[in-house]
Image: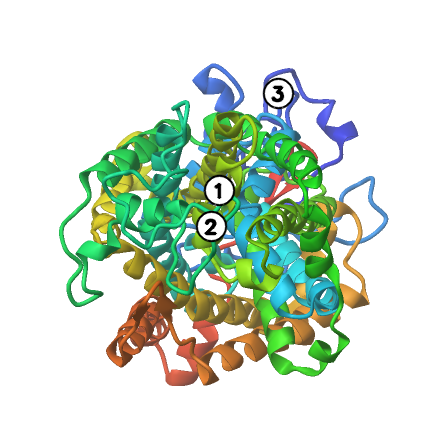
Amino acid sequence: ETEPLTSKKDASDCNKGEDCKENGLLVRNPKSALRLVEDGNKVHPSQGEKGEAAQISNGYSAVQSSGPCNGMAEGEDAQGTAPAATTTTTTTTSTTCGAEGQQQLMELEDRETWSKKIDFLLSVIGYAVDLGNVWRFPYICYQNGGGAFLIPYTIMAIFGGIPLFYMELALGQYHRNGCISIWRKICPIFKGIGFAICIIDLYVASYYNTIMAWAFYYLMSSFTAELPWTSCTNPWNTGNCTNYFSRANVSWALHSTSPAEEFYTRQVLQVHRSEGLDDLGGISWQLTLCLLLIFTIVYFSIWKGVKTSGKVVWVTATFPYIILFILLVRGATLPGAWRGVLYYLKPDWQKLLATEVWVDAAAQIFFSLGPGFGVLLAYASYNKFHNNCYQDALVTSTVNCLTSFVSGFVIFTVLGYMAEMRNEDVSEVAKDTGPSLLFITYAEAIANMPASTFFAIIFFLMLLTLGLDSTFAGLEGVITGVLDEFPHVWGKCRELFVLGLIIVCFLGSLATLTFGGAYVVKLFEEYATGPAVLTVVFLEAVAVSWFYGISQFCNDVKEMLGSAPGWYWRVCWVAISPLFLLFVTCSFLSNPPELRLFDYDYPYWTTVLGYCIGTSSIIFIPLYMVYRLISTPGTLKERILKSITPETATEIPFGDIRMNAV
């Protein structure tokens, strides 16, 4: 049933507070409440009857379409011309029935938005800038040619990472749904992508927060006059402990270990009490308490939605930059700092001929910006419809990349200082990778600075804030996805659902809290997220560009921003970005990483286990495709066509009205 909209001039002739009935036309009353009147039959009650015009949070009135329950209203080819318009426009009202209709109405009426634009920007920046920016980028940069690595990194960002980042922001903002239900409006057969994203986010929450628990343990241990990882006289130290900072004549032998390394491995992790993944040992009660406190902070930060988390990120997203600046200034004044900077940026142009360098550049920019975790979809879905998400994508991705680059100076000035103190080359000092770079090398350097207690406290507090807003984001991706998919179940009890989710994540983290938990963290970091997220975003790019249609997607962007994306973005979305993802995924699968942590070499069966963990999330994609084709009536051709055709219209604003876009 198609109803043309009368102009504002026509609407002004109506009596105040009443709907205009003029040949069955849909007319906007002065209160912006809508009714569809046909032959005196009111099919949608005025929101004014509820005492106030029910505006959803971005200022648009909620409209509930009505018509036969066949997925389309009658007379869908009819056209109406507004009196003030010079062109013919077609508006079709889609229909919803039963729970789906209630779900759409609830989405429109109850969806909140960010209190301020800066809340959204800080949340996205806080999500993208995480612990990996501090340890992963500097290590990958010097490992792959120093300054020369910036060339493939920039190219991969321009043609791969940023277009995918922009695409997810635009999808979330236009369709205003989480990672599961959004596929009803894009390509229903790919709905399994949403379930896969939720499983991946749960895996990340199970090990990522454990790293923050380590940082919290360090933070609590820093409130002493002498940091506990500065000497070899502690109960956990061994005979190999060598404190070369204490006396000038101490030599560094092959089997020497620093006090910081023994504090990390024997006191915090206690890996010496585990034989490996086949014998993880008991659970560390100290780390369990640290993790429990972290999850408590996370719960009370996100339980009310983006209104509360948007305020918390004012601290968690800005504080790390203050600390990075302080540490950068301090590092630049240390003796030998120039050696670290030179090692960090000295270009090795021959490295550019190696395929591995380009693979590392692509993987780094992808995991740094973070598409594929449902977070960008969730955060953008709380934006106002006409928010400039294009500008947001450029600003936040640029800030993220610059943060990674500056973090390299913070790390390598200290590594140069360490090399000066040990009288070794920087390459020998910079062997530690991953969390060990922060918890051993950097912690040891801080311990031997003047005012070491102060710098240790602010450094580990920075690590906590870097991790917290990324955790907020990852869990919000799951929460928004599930609540949008099942609003009639969880729509009114978000706090209870978030509590249950936090409990599940805490229980899922218990394996990482054992004495061999560091081995589990390493396994999950390499296999549970890497190839699975790459596969998810590849299919997402294919579904949007090739099934939903690049022209339709660009028209959606035009409705929000007023101008359609140019040819550069179209080419990236259709071809370059999918090829970028396929390239990285195939490279990973063809050369699976050989895992080694401390003195433990992962056995072959752990590689199989890792692939099983990764597959356990993306298996939902083909399973849902099969379920969709089986449950859809009709011939095989009809089933396929129905499964790749959007089944739910997206509400778009038309002045103060929200209309269905078909």
Q: Is residue 292 left or right of residue 350?
A: left
* SS for callout 3: loop
Tell me the colour scheme of the image. rainbow
* SS for callout 1: loop
Q: Amino acid at mark 2?
A: Val
Name the residue nearer the viewer: 37 or 310: 310
Q: Residues within 10 Å of mark 3 (few under 14, many from 20)?
A: some
Q: Is residue 308 left or right of residue 597?
A: right
Residue 388 position, x and y percent, is 72, 42
Location of mark 2 (residue):
250
Q: Report the residue at 37% width, 38% height from top.
A: 231
Q: Which of the 4 image quadrants contains residue 77?
A: bottom right
Distance from the alpha carbon under mark 3 to that under mark 1: 80 Å
* SS for callout 2: loop
| Image: 656 above or below 573 | above
Location of mark 1 (residue):
247
Q: Residues within 10 Å of mark 1 (few under 14, many from 20)?
A: few
Q: Residues within 10 Å of mark 2 (few under 14, many from 20)?
A: few
Distance from the alpha carbon under mark 2 to that under mark 3: 82 Å
